[in-house]
Image (tube, rainbow, N blue to C red):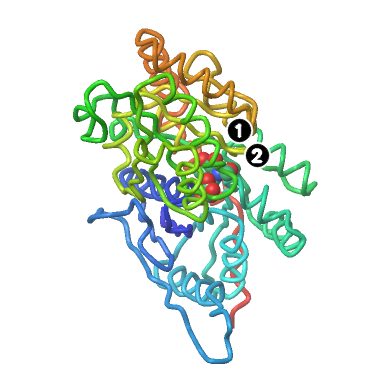
Amino acid sequence: MRIGITCHPSAGGSGILATELGLALAERGHVVHFVSYEIPFRLQGFHQNIFYHSVDFVTYPLFRHPPYSLALTTKMAEVAEEHDIEIWHAHYAIPHAVCAILARDMLKNGHCFKLVTTLHGTDITLVGTDPGFFRLTKYAMESSDAVTSVSQWLTEETQREFKLSVPVRTIYNFINLEKFQTHSVDRCNLAEAGEKIVMHISNFRPVKRVTDVVRAFKKISDRVNARLIMVGDGPERLSAVGVARQLGVSDRIKYLGNNENIEAILPCADLVFQPSEHESFGLVALEAMACGVPVLGTDSGGVREVVVNGETGYLCEVGDIETMAARAIEILTNDALARDMGARGRKHAETHFAREPIVAQYEALYRELLNQKCNGGKGA
Ligand code: GMT
């Protein structure tokens, strides 16, 4: 199949999943064209069957905000025609699904693609429900040829909020189990011998509650010789730095910034700590489990479909720092428990979230759509 993919290329989960899906599809012999303003975060190196098309920002003094969405739409239509794209897969509803609908309308000379929109979470829970975007998000979903979401929770949230006239199918996120392995370079030079490593990975948005990480870590480090490794970057990073300073734990925290090779760092952790307000899925939790690392998360959203509470980690109430710290200490001071949880996490990832069967679900969906009549665009 000839497949177009649009995603946010930055270090967010939706772009990562879109990239991993594109790589997997290309390995299965499909031709994949990515369109975005920069090469997606994890799409490094040369890959057969993968092409990248860059969108240029058009600036002009009249434009206070360069209209990226329009430039993206134009590029998508161009790529679709030039490469005779059959399926366009838009990851994250805003603006990608909307741009794809417009691009689909623009196609000329009998060109036509089927549009799959995958919802990733904040496109529905935060951005899409904003009154400024609600109608457009609903329109985009109802005008797609198929809508998927990354967890049952997100599927239900979407239907509850938007009351769509079309179905939303759940296709879980997946993990490349060959890339995410349990072995690590000893401690990865991140901590001294004898220190436990607590790791947080995110884009440091408010929904990630990074100051909870630091507050709980203070309580953890009062009891355990531990180091906190913060991976990623974003608007809340300075708040985390400020709270750490207030609590006197700055010297026990390392900030690594964004990292393209998360699979090299993750196995070094003794615990991955993600106290988010909610996660539609929690890709980091899955990556940690694949690396055999116990997860401490929150009992909210789709992460409950990923982490098995008490088995592959612990889920606590959002904001319950006391219990989070207690659970972390339990794991960090009991090597057998940590080892068992890690092993069960790896097994759970293998059984439920392996790449091939889930990519096959997307493939089956694409084929189903291609069996339906495709009306050409309205372009002249
Ligand atoms: O976590 C983010 O803020 C980034 C966001 C994105 O769309 O890039 O992540 C969402 O998509 C991931 C991949 O499907 C999910 O694993 C994350 O749980 C989800 N984030 C939220 O729902 C907050």
Mark number displayed over residue 91: none
CA distance for labels 1 and 2: 7 Å
Left or right relative to 142: residue 46:
left
> In which quadrant of the rendered view does residue 149 lie?
top right
Which residue in the structure is indicated by mark 1?
302
Where residue 344 sits: x, y (%)?
A: 42, 15
Indicate yes or no: mark 1 CB to ligand 1 under 8 Å: yes
Say if 172 sits above or below 13 in the image: above
Asked whether, in this view, residue 144 is left or right of residue 337, the answer is right
Q: Residue at x 38, y 71 (%)?
A: 54
Residue at x-position 50% and y-position 34%: 274
Q: Is the CB–ligand 1 distance for label 2 below 8 Å?
A: yes
Q: Which is more toward the observer, 349 or 375?
A: 349
Amino acid type, mark 2: Leu
Q: Looking at the rendering, which quadrant does residue 127 occupy?
A: bottom right
Q: Secondary structure at mark 2?
A: helix
Does the CB distance between marks 1 and 2 fall below 8 Å? yes
Q: Is residue 207 left or right of residue 366?
A: right
In this rendering, the answer to whether 326 lies above or below 22 is above
The answer, for residue 367, to whether it is visible in the render is: no
Could you tell me which residue is drawn at 43 percent across and 65 percent down?
A: 35
Q: Which residue is mark 2?
A: 154
Relative image position of residue 26 (x, y in whole percent): 33, 49
